[in-house]
Image (cartoon, helix red, strand yellow):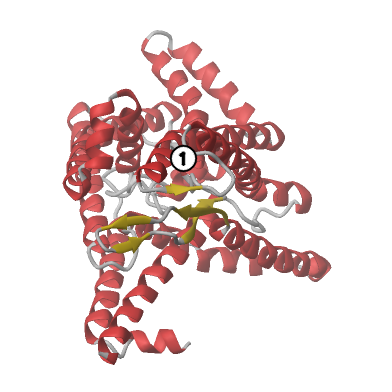
Amino acid sequence: MKKFLAIFKHPDLRRKIFSVLGLLVVYRMFAAIPIPGVDVTKLQQFFDSNQIFGLLNVFSGGGLSNLSIVMLAVGPYITGSIIMQLLTIIFPNLKKAYYEEGASGRAKFNRITRYLTVPLAVLQGYGFLNLLMAQGVISRLPLFDLISNVIIITAGSVLVMWIGELISEFKIGNGLSLLIFAGIVSSLPQDIISAFLNYSPALLTTYIVFAVLAIIVIAGVVFVNEGERKVPVSYAKQVRGMKLYGGASTYLPLKVNQAGVIPIIFAISILLFPQFIAQSLSIVSPGLSLSLNSWVTEFFNNHYIYSSLYFILVVMFTYFYTAVTFDPSEISKNLQKNGGFIPGIRPGQATTDIITKTVHRITLFGALFLGVVAILPNITQIITGIQSLQIGGTALLIVVAVALESMKQIDSQLSLREYDNNF
C-alpha cells in the first residue's frame, strides 16, 4: 500500500501511469466498434459454441467476438515476432544482428517485425472473414465490402501495434502484453455477474471449493512464473597491472518457465490449422469442405479429446520454444570468455552439458504445469458442469505474467527516484 501511494507522490511517474491508462481506454473504445454489416448476436453464439475460436478471442481481448475494427489486436504482431525468432535459427546473420549488435540490432529486428505485421494482418483478416461467411455467421459480402473490411482490420492491427509501442515507452510494462491484459480484465465484471446469476444454495459447497482452489492456482502460477534454478558460478582471479580482479561468486538464474505463454500461442495455431484447411477446400469442393469443417468442430467440441490434445501440444511446444530461445552452448562460451565457471565442472563442453541437463529437468516441470493450467477451465467444467466456473487457463497465465512484470518495472522506477532523492 505504501508503494502504491508513493506512485502518486512523483509527478512524472503519476503522469506515466495515467497516460498508460488513457491509452488502454482508447484501445478498449476501438474494441467496441464493430466493422460494417455484423450481427453481434450470431457472432456471440458462434464463439460460445466453438472452443478454439473462444480461446483465440482471449488474445484479441474480446475484440474478435464482435468483429471490432481491432479484432486481430496483437495477433499479427505476435505471429510476426514468432516467425522472426524462428528465422534467427535458419539465418545465422540475423541471429548475430539481434544478439551481438545490441540496441541497433534489436531496432532492425523490431522494424522488420512491424513490416511483416501488415501482410500477416491482411491474410488473417481475409481468412477469418471467409471462414465466418462459409459458416453462415455473417452474410456473404460483396467484393468491395470484403476488401474494405480487410483494409479496416489491417489498419486496426497497425493502430494497436502503435498504441502498444507507445505504452512500452513509458516503462510501466510491455505495451502489447498490457493490451491483452486490459482485454481479459474487461470481461471480469460480466463473468462475476454470470456466476451470481447462476448461483444456487445447493451449490454453496462447490462455490467455496472453487474459491479456495482459485486462490491456490493463482499462488501456484505466481510461484512457478517467478521460480528459477540458481546455478552457482565463480570467476577466476585476474591480475591487471597492479590490481587484482575477479574472484567473485554469483549464480546463473535458469527460469522454470523459460517460454512464458508462447507455447500456448503455438498450440492454438496448430489447433486452428484443421479448420483453415477445411475452409480452403471450399474452392475445390464446397460439400467436402462443409463436411470436414463439421467433423473438425464436433471433434474439438469434445472436452476430453480437446483437452488431451491441447495439453500434449503445450508440453511439446514448451520444450521446442525453450530450445529455440535458450542456447546452453552460447552461455558456456560467454562464461568461459569472461573467466567464469561452474564449481566442480570443467569449462567448455562439460559446462554446456550440465546446463542443458538442468534446463531439461526444470523445463519438464514448467511444461507440465503450463499444460495443466491451460486446460484447467475444461477440467472444472467437466467436474462441476457449470460453464461460468473456470479456474486457470490461458487468461490467468497472461494476467499474472503481465501484472508481475508491470509491478517490477514500477518498483524499479520508485527505487530509482528514492535513490535520487537521497542524494
Query: Residue at position x 50%, y 47% from top?
Result: 258
Task: Count residues near mark 1 (Cα–Cα under 10 Å), then give few for <14, some for 14-19, many for 20+.
Answer: many
The extreme top residue here reads 284
Instruction: Find disc 1 in the rendering and name its residue.
Output: 265
Q: Is residue 81 visible?
A: yes
* Element under disc 1: helix
Q: Position of residue 142 (x, y in %)?
A: 23, 28
Relative height, residue 108 to residue 383 (above, below): above
Q: Answer left or right for 74 relative to 142.
A: right
Say which of 148 and 267 sits in front: 267
Q: Position of residue 88 (x, y in %)?
A: 31, 31
Query: Residue at position x 63%, y 33% from top?
Result: 312
Q: Is residue 53 visible?
A: no
Q: Position of residue 104 (x, y in %)?
A: 16, 46
Please tell me in which quadrant of the rendered image residue 28 appears: bottom left
Query: Residue at position x 47%, y 65% from top?
Result: 404
Please tell me in which quadrant of the rendered image residue 245 appears: bottom left
Q: Position of residue 19 (x, y in %)?
A: 24, 73
Q: Answer left or right for 336 relative to 252.
A: left
Identify which amino acid the numbered label 1 is placed on: Ile
Relative height, residue 312 to residue 1 (above, below): above
Query: Residue at position x 74%, y 46% from top?
Result: 382
